[in-house]
Image (tube, rainbow, N blue to C red):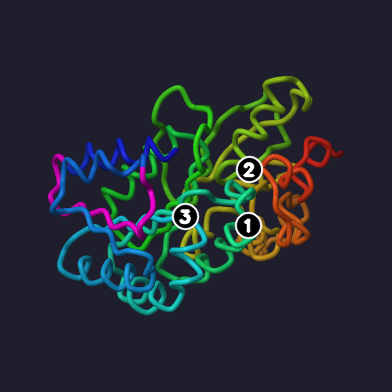
Amino acid sequence: MRNAFVDELISRAEQDESIILVVGDLGYGVVEPFARRFPKRFFNAGVAEQNMMGLSAGLASEGFHVFAYSIANFPTFRCAEQIRNDIDYHKLPVTIVAVGGGLAYGNLGYSHHAVQDYALLRSMPNLLIASPGDPMEVKACMRYLFDHPQPSYLRLGKAGEPCIHESVPIVSPGKWLTIYKAENSKKIFLTTGATLATVNALLVDGTMDSAWSLSSLPLWGMKYKSDQIRQASSYDEVRAVEDHLVDAGFGSWLLEATSKDPSVVSKIKLFGLDSNVCGMVGKQSTLNNLGGLSKETLCKQ
């Protein structure tokens, strides 16, 4: 996902001189191609994330579309006030790029877990969450953000995520993106972010029965709840899957979005991480399993 991000950023920056990349002294091995190609549009703010967001907001107020890049926990909770006051409330075109969403950096300790970021950022009224599930969705989200500059949060996996899509899809906020449509399907998995690959693997290898469909929702946020009842009402069961704490995450957002129709709310089941992972250290797959994103849990009837 990181490489797809940088490739897409460079491609657009060739055409659009308003594109700027700001980093918090991280991203080495990934961001250098942009820095070499556009040295006057690359800034290293150092280990000073609050200043990084202030700098990004200032540049954005002068007409630039700024991409502020760091490991997921650093440009979010450390900068909550700057994101709210400087970026979101002023509706500035700053895209906060968080690499290592969920438990991707789990082996570096719980200081690096990004399992509460949705909870914080989806409370920002003007901020669009972009949580792609594979490199093709990264490109799709980037293209949408280029064409619709606004306060946004781009949540990326760490590295090595498989391509689920054969080509770059077209994405739109709040619109479910079909991955697999089972014949006469009345049951669906709805994912956001890296859990797309997890669920897709269960369907491809036959672990889940063929009655299940799969969609992803890469773009969502406070403003984009209105169409969720219509989309969910086509199914008897909707399993929302995310690598975030169940509390205040994507599934909770979906429940809020459908709360006006009790018949739809009752169809939705949430699959995310238990808070027991918050004090754990280990590799991503191990922590996901311990936290409730195991094959056994997802396949539970």
| Residue 254 image label | 1
Q: Secondary structure at mark 2?
A: strand
Q: Tell me which numbered mark, 3 or 2, is placed earlier along the sequence.
A: 3
128 w.r.t. 62: above or below? above
254 displayed left or right of 269 = left
Q: Secondary structure at mark 3?
A: strand
Residue corresponding to mark 3: 71
Residue 33 inside the magenta-drawn segment? no
Residue corresponding to mark 2: 190
**Residue drawn at the location 57% of the way across and 58% of the way down:** 112
**Residue drawn at the location 16% of the way across and 40% of the way down:** 37
Gap between marks 3 and 1 measured at Cα: 26 Å
**Residue drawn at the location 70% of the way across and 47% of the way down:** 282
Residue 272 position within the rendered picture, expressed as x and y whole percent measured from the top left: 71, 51
Gap between marks 3 and 2 measured at Cα: 26 Å
Q: Are marks 2 and 1 in contact (CB under 8 Å)?
A: yes
Residue reaching furthest to the right:
301
Q: Nearer the viewer, residue 87 or 160?
A: 160
Residue 60 position within the rendered picture, expressed as x and y whole percent measured from the top left: 22, 66
277 displayed left or right of 217 = right
The amino acid at mark 2 is Leu
Residue 128 position within the rendered picture, expressed as x and y whole percent measured from the top left: 42, 59
Q: Tell me which numbered mark, 2 or 1, is placed earlier along the sequence.
A: 2
Of discs 3 and 2, which sits in the foreground? 3
Gap between marks 2 and 1 measured at Cα: 10 Å
Question: What main secondary structure does the magenta stretch of the protein show?
Answer: loop
Residue 17 inside the magenta-drawn segment? yes
**Residue drawn at the location 53% of the way across and 43% of the way down:** 176
| Magenta-highlighted residues | 14-28
Where on the picture, by quarter, is residue 87? bottom left
| Residue 280 image label | none
Q: Nearer the viewer, residue 45 or 122?
A: 45
